[in-house]
Image (cartoon, rainbow, N blue to C red):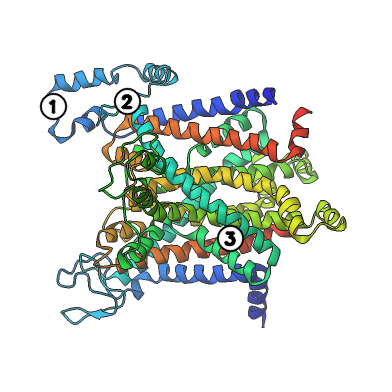
Amino acid sequence: MAAWFFRKIYSTFLPTLLGASLLSFFLLRMVPGDPVLNLLGERGGNPEMVEAMRARLGLDKPLLEQYGIFMSQAIRGDLGQSVISKEPVLVEFAARMPATLELAIVALFWTIMIGIPLGILAAHFRGWVDVGVVGISLIGSSLPIFWWALVLILYVSVGWNLLPVSGRIAVQYDVPLWSGFLLIDVWRTEEPWPAFISALRHLMLPSLVLGTVNLALLLRMVRSGILEAMDEDFVRLARAKGAGRFRVLWVHALRSAWVPVVTVLGLMVGSLLTGAVITETIFSWPGVGKWIVKSLEARDYPVIQGAILLFAAMMLMVNLLVDVIYLWVDPRMRKGLSS
Amino acid sequence: MKQPNFFKHFFQRLGLSGSIGFVLLSVVFLAAILASPLSPYSPIEVYTDSVKIPPGSVSPSGQKYILGTDDLGRDLLSRVLHGAQVSVGIGFAVVIMSGFFGVILGLLAGSFGGWVDQVIMRGIDLLMALPSLLLALVVVAALGPGLQNCILAISLVSLPSITRTLRAGVLIEKNKNYVWASKHFGSSWFRTYFFGVLPNCMAPLIVQLTYAFGEGILNAAALGFLGLGAQAPLPEWGTMLADGRSFLESASWLVIWPGFCLFVTVLGVNLFGDGLRQWLLSTGNRT
């Protein structure tokens, strides 16, 4: 197990991360125009200023040396600093990540709480329940989430005035950040309940939007996983031994359906990050997605470069985690490992 | 006598949902082809006297607008119809680009194996290490916003699934007798793989390309929505949504209709793709 893990690290994790760093570094060097002149903008500047800035950003050195400097700093945890705010990229990222994580966790939570039982019900009852679930899954996977978000805002927020349109919490609540997760931090204030409710209300629409596509995917996988498992010999055996339908479905069949479900959960992390870019932009959610769009608009290249590397690292870690969870949920895979 | 039989067979094989998808897609394609004759007005001409007219109303100058007009007085119906043209065009461009390179890379990786395979597949892993939209965003940021760069970026995003599908197919096919025979009769690598192996890997490839078509349209609209895709005044659905967003309360139809068209198109592609998959992949070679 340990040997397998380390082999995975140096044969997949590290090379891909290295590749991502190369990709982000050289892609951003392809940008048409001089980055320094772009940064100085229309005001321009005298030639000395341009040269000074070029030297300060290290852009006067050969490309390969620039990459070497970037990597050796990155390994030591220094991803450079934002050109706009002058803050280190890692600090900016760490400040925004909790907001994105909070949104993603809430979205993931309700997706799983609804997706898995509903998928099982569809596989169990078939008939109109099944048709309904398949329908939801088809519609959900085709919804352009930016449109879905705007439609929800139009009816739920603007039309019926039920939920807030943007931000993380109503302005009158001043919650000092401690963990970065507002749902936790509100409990350190004097009057936590109203602030907690407000934070929860602000989370509802964005997490609904963020979770919709994933719900569609999860429903589909759970349903087909269970249907496939129901045809297996071990399910027939369990039935023959006298296990009730309920037990067979929730214990025996669900267990073998875990493998595709874990795959989908792994894929979801990627789609949560992608979805965060759009969802956060629409709902003015102060997380990493909005940060990246802002940096792209402002051509803040150190930030973009660092963000790509951090996102790739997160994705790769999730993939690694998914592989480990596979071994945990499916003993058959553990057997293949030792041989 | 022959025609009805063909259609009956076709729809039976596609299944119910596949047929619904086919019909939806046909409507979108027809709208795209007939956009100019069907449009009552120009999609880009600005009429300052008929700004934000609600759907079905008549403008001060006595013209009727079925879907209303936008903030610059452009007829929404005409823009939505021309938007179909733009989106279908983007979809085909993405399919052609990613299909072309995906086929070449997949054939190379599958047939040669060894270091060629390693290099290509590591590159593909790399493209998959980033969330798809983020990759497209970064590529567009590097190349500059615009429709062409947006298509390029989205094709890059669709490349992994196509390359992997074809590589898997080639790995199954390459040990079969006909490949051996073809090689030993002196066919070149090109002839063996492009005319021998490729046609035998078509079924999963077609399904994958169908999904790439829908995903390409969706991603292009997302880039357009973020202001990095098609640029005004081109009537692209995502860009229209971004423009209409500022008038969500005063002119909600500017948000509803372009998005609805996008949704119907993507739904059609996905349904049709599912139908195709059941038809092409559940008989014979099951993957």
Q: Which amino acid is tagged 3?
A: Gly
The answer to whether A144 is drawn above or below residue A10 in the figure is: below
B149 sits left or right of A107 in the view: left
- Quarter of the image for the C terminus of chain A: give it: top right
- Would you name the residue on which mark 2 appears? A88
Specify the quadrant of the image occupied by residue A43: top left
Specify the quadrant of the image occupied by residue A189: top left
- Residue name at image x 64 percent, y 53 percent: B204
- Would you name the residue on which mark 1 appears? A45
Mark 3 burial class by Cα count in 10 Å: few <14, some 14-19, many 20+:
many
- Would you name the residue on which mark 3 appears? B273
A154 sits left or right of B125 in the view: left
Disc number lying in front (2 or 3): 2
Where disc 1 sits, the SS reads loop
Instruction: Identify the chain of the residue marked 1, using the numbered disc in the image.
Output: A
Q: Which amino acid is tagged 1?
A: Gly
Instruction: Kindly tell me whether residue A203 is visible in this rendering.
Output: yes
On the same chain: label 1 and label 3?
no
The CA distance from mark 2 to mark 3 is 46 Å
Is there a contact, CB below 8 Å, between mark 1 and mark 3?
Answer: no
Instruction: Identify the chain of the residue marked 2, using the numbered disc in the image.
Output: A
The CA distance from mark 1 to mark 3 is 55 Å
- Quarter of the image for the N terminus of chain A: give it: top right
> Along the line of sight, which residue is nearer the eye, A307 or B193?
A307
The spot of residue A159 in percent (x, y) is 32, 68
The spot of residue A107 in percent (x, y) is 48, 50
> Along the line of sight, which residue is nearer the eye, B205 or B196?
B205
The CA distance from mark 1 to mark 2 is 25 Å
The spot of residue B10 in percent (x, y) is 65, 71
Instruction: Kindly tell me whether residue B133 is visible in this rendering.
Output: no
